[in-house]
């Protein structure tokens, strides 16, 4: 990647947080789904989306939250996978036409078996049994679901039941389900052990996973399907593949589609969006952890200069599509994985221009100081298009200098011939 990096300092720039622009411009009319999103967990960026914050019936995508809470309880030591439960009358709330393991009151089953049934069979009786065990009863567990949703920043979501039954007030969005899926993978990667299973049998009831892509694409390992008449056919899909960037050998993407017309259609739509994103975007490290960005003077401190550094690598998703028109998914060739333009396969570009502007939020620091504060903001551009704003927060731990040193610093500030002795903030050139 050819990187052109320019740096500027400014006191007047105000930034309220991290924001992003979509990476690929896809014509939504060419995607047969009511709502969808493509999310890159490594960069935290949305590659493309449509109606991704529309509140819709999530159906059995709801069960990802049940799994999230269950795995959280296991990690906290409140549950064990080997714990045996005795099914009770709560399973009777499950109607005959609902997906289920066919649990009956009095039958014994382990937490591990319930998790497998929940994810692979999409079993509603597994959902309510886990909910009652963890929450004490269903209403208390639903409260836990909504608390966790709020903690994860799922602002388009409200749950009223653990199974995903269509009810007033039970809704989520494609964007929120991508957040939930990412949280599952990041915090409880064991979830993928369940979501990648293609078949499960319990008590002579066998069930093939409804995520048909598990048997078609070896890189796919989750996440969850869902269907009700109100929701249509939903799919939260994830895969891990080799990255085109050798510095980042593996790359995971998450795609959520909602409101498609059939199980085949949801798989096809999600898979095409995922393949497009893998082939026409790339993850790049634009700033390395501990790489010096700038240096600020320290007043009244034991040290005279403080260096601003990012705590982690900064990864951005780069567009490898350079055409001026929106992408028509009808021109996507599933066999090659590439778009067709005028009858020819459109190859992804290889060289991109990335421009970083650093804008300082502080021109100097005064000791003593020990608090996390925003010291700079990075504005990231690619191919002359704004991509993202990133706040750089550090925790300067600055000890105060001695009385004599502070007096000497004061003298330097009031006497004209000492002015040059206090060096101003410095921006480091990179690249």
Image (cartoon, rainbow, N blue to C red):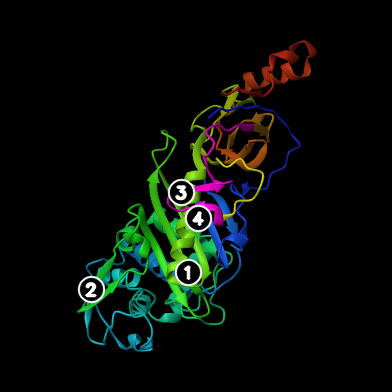
Q: Is residue 379 above or below residue 406?
A: below
The CA span between labels 4 and 3 is 10 Å
What's the residue at 27%, 70% (across, down)?
111
Question: Between disc 1 and disc 2, whose residue precedes?
Answer: 2
The CA span between labels 2 and 3 is 35 Å
The CA span between labels 1 and 3 is 23 Å
Comparing 181 with 353, the one in front is 353
Mark 3 neighbour density, 10 Å: few (under 14) some (14–19) many (20 or more): some
Kindly report which numbered mark, 2 or 3, lies closer to the viewer in this rendering.
3
Mark 2 neighbour density, 10 Å: few (under 14) some (14–19) many (20 or more): some
What's the residue at 35%, 88% (across, down)?
96
Query: Which residue position holds label 1?
Result: 234
Q: Is residue 380 above or below residue 138?
A: above
Measuring from the top left, give residue 164's x and y in whole percent.
45, 76
Question: What is the number of the mark on residue 337?
Answer: 3
Query: Which residue position holds label 2?
Result: 201
The CA span between labels 4 and 2 is 32 Å
Which stretch appears magenta?
A: 330-356
What's the residue at 61%, 27% (across, down)?
4
Measuring from the top left, give residue 333's x and y in whole percent.
48, 52
Query: Which residue position holds label 4?
Result: 273
Query: SS of the residue at dot 2?
Result: strand
Could you tell me if the residues under marks 2 and 3 are in contact, i.e. CB atoms within 8 Å?
no
């Amino acid at each position: 990647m050819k990187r052109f990096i320019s740096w500027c300092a400014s006191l007047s720039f105000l930034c309220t947080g991290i924001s992003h622009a979509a990476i690929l411009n896809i014509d939504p009319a060419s995607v047969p789904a009511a709502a969808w999103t493509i999310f890159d967990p490594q960069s935290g960026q949305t590659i493309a989306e449509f109606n991704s914050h529309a509140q819709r019936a999530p159906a059995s995508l709801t069960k990802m939250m049940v799994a999230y809470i269950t795995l959280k309880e296991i990690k906290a030591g409140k549950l064990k996978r080997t714990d045996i439960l005795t099914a009770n009358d709560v399973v009777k709330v499950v109607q005959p036409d609902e997906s289920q393991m066919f649990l009956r009151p009095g039958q014994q089953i382990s937490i591990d078996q319930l998790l497998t049934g929940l994810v692979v069979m999409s079993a509603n009786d597994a959902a309510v049994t886990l909910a009652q065990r963890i929450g004490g009863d269903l209403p208390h567990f639903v409260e836990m679901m909504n608390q966790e949703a709020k903690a994860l920043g799922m602002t388009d979501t409200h749950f009223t039941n653990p199974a995903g039954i269509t009810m007033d007030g039970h809704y989520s969005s494609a964007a929120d389900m991508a957040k939930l899926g990412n949280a599952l993978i990041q915090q409880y990667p064991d979830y993928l052990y369940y979501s990648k299973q293609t078949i499960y049998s319990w008590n002579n009831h066998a069930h093939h996973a409804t995520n048909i892509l598990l048997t078609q694409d070896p890189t796919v390992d989750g996440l969850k399907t869902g269907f009700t008449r109100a929701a249509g056919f939903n799919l939260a899909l994830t895969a891990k593949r080799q990255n085109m960037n050798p510095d980042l050998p593996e790359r995971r993407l998450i795609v959520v589609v909602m409101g498609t017309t059939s199980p085949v259609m949801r798989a096809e739509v999600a898979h095409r969006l995922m393949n497009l994103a893998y082939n026409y975007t790339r993850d790049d490290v634009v700033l390395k952890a501990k790489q010096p960005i700038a240096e600020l003077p320290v007043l009244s401190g034991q040290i005279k200069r403080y260096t601003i550094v990012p705590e982690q690598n900064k990864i951005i998703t780069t567009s490898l599509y350079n055409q001026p028109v929106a992408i028509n998914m009808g021109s996507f060739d599933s066999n090659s994985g590439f778009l067709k333009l005028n009858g020819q396969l459109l190859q992804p570009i290889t060289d991109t221009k990335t421009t970083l502007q650093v804008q300082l939020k502080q021109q100097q620091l005064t000791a003593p100081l020990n608090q996390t504060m925003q010291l700079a903001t990075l504005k990231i551009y690619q191919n002359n298009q704004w991509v993202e704003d990133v706040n750089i927060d550090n925790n300067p731990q600055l000890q105060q200098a001695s009385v004599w040193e502070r007096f000497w610093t004061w003298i330097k500030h009031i006497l004209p011939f000492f002015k040059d002795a206090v060096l101003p903030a410095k921006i480091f050139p990179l690249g």
